[in-house]
Amino acid sequence: MSMPASAVEPPHWAFQPVRRPDLPAVKNSGWSRQPPDAFILARLEAVGLQPAPPADRRTLLRRASLDLTGLPPTPAAMEAFLADPSPDAFAKTIDQLLASPQYGERQARLWLDVARYADSKGYVYAREERFFVHSWAYRDWVVRAFNENLPWDRFLKLQIAADQIVPEGSPDLAAMGFLTGGRRFIGVTHDIIDDRIDVVTRGTMALTVQCARCHDHKFDPIPTSDYYSLYGIFHNGADQLVRVDATPRNDDFEKGLAIRQKSFDEKLAGRRTGAAARLRARAGDYLAAQLELQRYPEEGFDQLLQESDIIPASVRRWRDFLRQSGGAFHPILAPWHVLSRLESKDFSAAAEKALATLRREHATGLNPAVAAAFAMPPASMKEVAARYGTLFGAALKEGGDAEVGNFLQDDAGPCAVPEAPLASIELFFPTNHVEELWKLQSEIHRWLIQRPEAPPYALIMKDLPPEPLPRVFRRGNSGQAMEEVPRQFLKVIAGPQRKPFTQGSGRRELADALTTPDNPLTARVAVNRIWQQHFGRGLVRTVSDFGLRADPPSHAELLDWLAAEFTASSWDVKALHRRILLSAAWQQASRPAPATDPENRLLSSQNRRRLDLEQLRDAMLAVSGDLETTMGGKAAELFQPANKRRSLYGMVDRQYLPGTFRTFDFACPDFLVGQRHETTVPQQSLYLLNNPFAADRARSLAKFCEETPPSEAPGVLFRAIFQRPPTERERELASQYLTEAAATAAGSPPAPPPTPWSYGFGHYDEDSKKVTKFTPLPHFTGTAWQGGPKLPDDTLGWAQLTAEGGHAGNDLDHAVIRRWSAPQDGTISITSSFKHGHPEGDGVSAFIVSSREGELARASLHHGEAELGYRRLEVKQGDTLDFIVHLGGSLNNDDFVFSQTLTSGDHTWESAREFTPAPSAAATVLSPLAQLAQVLLLSNEFTFAD
Amino acid sequence: MISYLTPPPRTSRRDFLRRTGMGFGSIGLASVLGQAGALGSGAPAIGSHFAPRAKRVVHFFMNGGPSQVDTFDPKPILTKYDGKPLPAENLRTERKTGAAFGSPFKFSRYGQSGLEISELFAKTAAHADDIAVIRSMVAQAPNHEPSLMLMNCGDSLQARPSVGSWVLYGLGSENNNLPGFISMCPGGYPIKDTENWQSAFLPGAYQGTYVDSKHTRLEQLIENIRSPHATAGVQQRQLNLLRRLDGEYQQRAGADPRFEARLESFDLAFRMQTEATDAFDIMREPEPIREMYGSHVQGRQTLIARRLLERGVRFVQLWHGGSQPWDNHDSIEANHRRLAAEVDQPIAALIADLKQRGMFEDTLIIWGGEFGRTPSVELNENGKSKMGRDHNHYGFSVCLAGGGIKGGTAYGATDDFGFRAVENPTTVHDLHATMLHCLGFDHTKLTYRHAGRDFRLTDVSGEPIQAILT
């Protein structure tokens, strides 16, 4: 583990300027194809290792195609490439791949890992729409940026400060989703800013500035003050949702939007005015609150507040205002400032002195009403607050002091609720107002999310009027603000001569500082991320940490050469890809690493790489001909069978991320991920074996072979899936499999055993204790028996039975009945649990009725639970037991849970477990050919790129 | 440092799986063997730092926040003040509270130790001499969200791995055919959803597997556990073919340990379809055992938990129910009585059952919520009593039992009214440090490198509570 650099040591390699080294001398000069090769070969020769032979052409094309576009080549592309004898055949192919729109899609996904991309905000309170409006527009912007080969410096700059670079309404504003797309941390400002500092510093410069939030960085030369310099930049801005395509949509959409916008705007304006009036009216109380700040918690400690309460956010606003105005003379608050610095001992005497000095030094500046109020020395700070309270009250009356009145009315003053988006000011309102405002705000957001014609929106950051300088929070605790720091860049990069930023928040200047060619980190980090993409790991393996504890580069000079070349090429990303793919190093075959370099850090061969979730899923869709190549637009649930678009367009709902994402090592969307984990767990195998996804692809492939003579089918499958013909042996294995599979008629799952359960409806006559007219429910949905495909059904209404319960029918003639018919004679015991879960409505009633003994148990429930049972009931084969539920007085919230367990000796029947399985799966069973196709899709050859 | 391209070290396969397993089989060779190379950072699961007292954990999570003064923290003075204002000002909580609200429940002394427990947990109390109560827990905010995150993941706001994920990362799982960390919650997610069992920056394989225990059918319990399109026979043949074709491929491509790892994981998945069926099927238990746990869903999921623990699952969380059942802002007497009745019998049954199987000594049992409740009564908007209690993070109780825990102990104390922890205030980090200690870990050394820092479950503080350890 490295220790912080001492003065005598040379500075850490990553902080030194990038210089372009000369190419090293090599013996085997014929091997190199690109300048980077010299660096690789020199190291290999130095330790006596030979580079691997070049990979064969099939391997090369598949590898290049997966690297650049995330998709395997089509068989046609493969054949064209193999048939092209020209020496630049591969270079031409690379250019085609770089020019294909799929290139941008693949590269975008890799960057979205860094940008901790998600379509939802993470946990929010119920009042707030939990999906972002803007995510997809950001994702599409990233795709376009790669496809248009936006220079890397501009790519980064726009993501950090597009609001200050491009005009209003520009589609490039969408880039700022990089900053604004993180988790919302239930609105806690400090954590939102922390997330942004991290994504910017680690994403662009691989510096873990976040570590300096609570104390100076333990390893890197990043003091806490630098963290708060950046904190100040992001604090001095607010998020704003802006439309980036002004083209009017249809009237219906635009009108609907306008109505929603209007009701929100009006309500917000009214609430702001009301809140500010309350704040002014109680300004004295807010001053008094400053004397016991510990009673008012910081953000993240949420109290339910009423209009009559002191609002903690406003107490904090007063606190900050006082803190900031305390440095200079303030015509109204001067006595407060002066007196609050006094000791409480002998307060009165000290106050008299201090006030005299104040009057002397600021005879004209001090507001006369204030001067009058403090003509006599107060006895305590409490009294000071009280006097201000009286003074403020008088000023607000007709004819009151104008200067004091203006101070209380000032939009930038402590009594104001700032004019800013709701997310930034919600804490200034009592709880019921916050809920009401969020509901209206969410109406707008939902309109934009749900309407298919909605235009793209960008969630940008916009500077607020310049704020006072940020202060360092002791141990990261916002309640303990320490010294002020300028908004400025990191000292370790900007050097001791750095100048504070001067334009607004300084965010634009930050973006510039990140992307000047002499920033030693940005270019190194970018080329290293791209190198990792092509070799499975970076020259620096800790791709998002270039600090003192970073892994040292395996080829430091190569890293510098690439970085220098990258900035010299005006940050040309496609040129960098091209250069790497044309290198002899990249084109090596993959093979086991030599014993002397077990990690293959010296790259004496290419590294075999496993397809990630997106590559694997997209490749399966592609080879089966199912891939839909439509680009862009709103996200849809990824694991829905109907979704056949590239995985990039799958919904990343960070709060309810479907388990399959992380099963396949998808990047956790809560923070920047520079390199995914690579795990092998049986859940992956279960998904591939049993989930319909792979099976559906296999079916498509089998269908594709329908016209093919059976003996040719394996060849067709191999060509589609691996873009190669099978070997003789493979053809033999495949044919043998097909013959055997066809011969074993065990292709279909066994018929389910006869069940004692049936599902119907009827009338229960409580007098005779008998069921009349048991009629089976006619329709099975896969999870429920009911009247028809939709609920309520036109004739049978709401009547429904599910595994665990169901829904009572619309009247007493439609009680739902789960019937058990005794398969043999015996003695049974019955237990059951019955539950109605709604306070609404009037509940439901349940009965257990034996055809032999009549009613055995009953219960009427409304928002409650009951256990119904019976011990030792004699039954004869064919007797029935009915489990009946009908509604209470009226049809209202009549769904219920009612499940039964019947035991007889060692035999048990469970109603929920034995609920009718889906109708015979015969139609879904895979044909032998589809079984074969599935095997090929599951194979290692398909899952790895050699 | 070893990369993912090296052959596995010379370890027997059994050791290898035990060392690296994390439930549902092993994490891939890439992650196990590769450190910085494949994972970017981090250390592999290296096993305990010292001999563990507990090998597995079951956590009864009373989500919503059970009231300490009604369960494990008797306050006779509070009862005396019932209906009168507390002598000191009420602490600030989420909502407004009023007068002292004495517990409507009767406390008694149990066991040799005489540990005082309320009638709500009378059945569990039969095991009082096995239980250590921490009566001085503190959290950071009176809101469910941050407190759930703190209790489950050690941080109120930031995305951090959950306790179960850390434990799995540290110890692996002893059954490769089942997930090593399972969170059961009947009827949907608790507040904060899957964040409660997230693996965050640890590999996805360490995250908790959620099971909605209201279901009884296996297909609904575990995703993709059944094939809708192939019989076991067909799958067996497919896997045979997969191996044979892969042999052909490997002849051309050369050996790579990752190839074998994948093929094995298919075999594991195939076997799991049977193993999981068995583990989740409580009907395979004799009737007396089922009766001991009771037929309520709490009993059912507790019995499933025992079957899972028995099969080597490392960490099981049993949530009381979707959303926040214990959040009794009003009518606490009826609500707490009902909730406690649902869970008391299963807890007592589990302790007895583990004892009779010789598993109690090395199973760590935890009971608690994300915080406690106020000793003062909650008021509605008009200042009227709601006969319930608000959230209280200033002082609450958590119970532990089993491996490494000194039973019959009460540690720490709240003030006379049960509002604030005053004696040995215990942070959630202390609790986590204690849990890790029982599992054989020095909590300061179970770390994972992420974003330039060596993160640990307990962040920068926390001490194991020696007084409740054997």
Image (spheres, coloured by chain):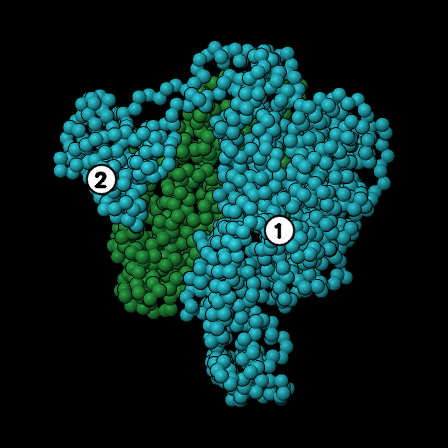
Chain colours: A cyan, B green
Q: Secondary structure at mark 2?
A: helix
In the displayed structure, A271 sits above or below A808; it is below
Quadrant containing the C terminus of chain B is: top left
Label located before the other in sequence (2 or 1):
1
What residue lies at 57% left-to-right and 87% top-to-bottom?
A368
Is B105 placed left or right of A59 in the picture? left
Give x and y (percent) for residue A719.
64, 20
Q: Residue at x 59, y 35 (%)?
A: A646
Q: Give a yes or no on whether discs 2 and 1 share a subunit.
A: yes
Name the chain letter of the residue that bears numbered label 1: A
* Furthest residue in direction left, as rendered: A768
Identified by mark 1, the residue type is Thr
Q: Which residue is mark 2?
A: A812
Residue at 30 percent of width and 31 percent of height: A777
Please, what is the three-letter code of the amino acid marked with disc 2? Leu
Marks 2 and 1: which is nearer the front?
A: 1
Q: Are marks 2 and 1 in contact (CB under 8 Å)?
A: no
Q: Is residue A488 left or right of residue A693?
A: right
- Residue at the (46%, 35%) spot, across then down: B180
Residue A851 visible in image: yes
Judged from this view, the residue extending furthest toward the front is: A251
Q: Position of residue B81 (x, y in %)?
A: 28, 66
Disc 2 crowd, CA 10 A, few/some/many (<14, 14-19, 20+): some
C-alpha separation, residue under disc 2 versus residue under disc 1: 56 Å
Labelled disc at residue A104 = none
Which numbered circle lies on residue A247? 1
Tell me the chain of label 2.
A
SS at circle 1: loop
* Left/right of residue A35 with respect to residue A139 in the rendered view: right
Residue B61 pos. (x, y %)? 39, 46
The answer to whether residue B66 is left or right of residue A692 is left
Residue A245 vs residue A111, the one in the foreground: A245
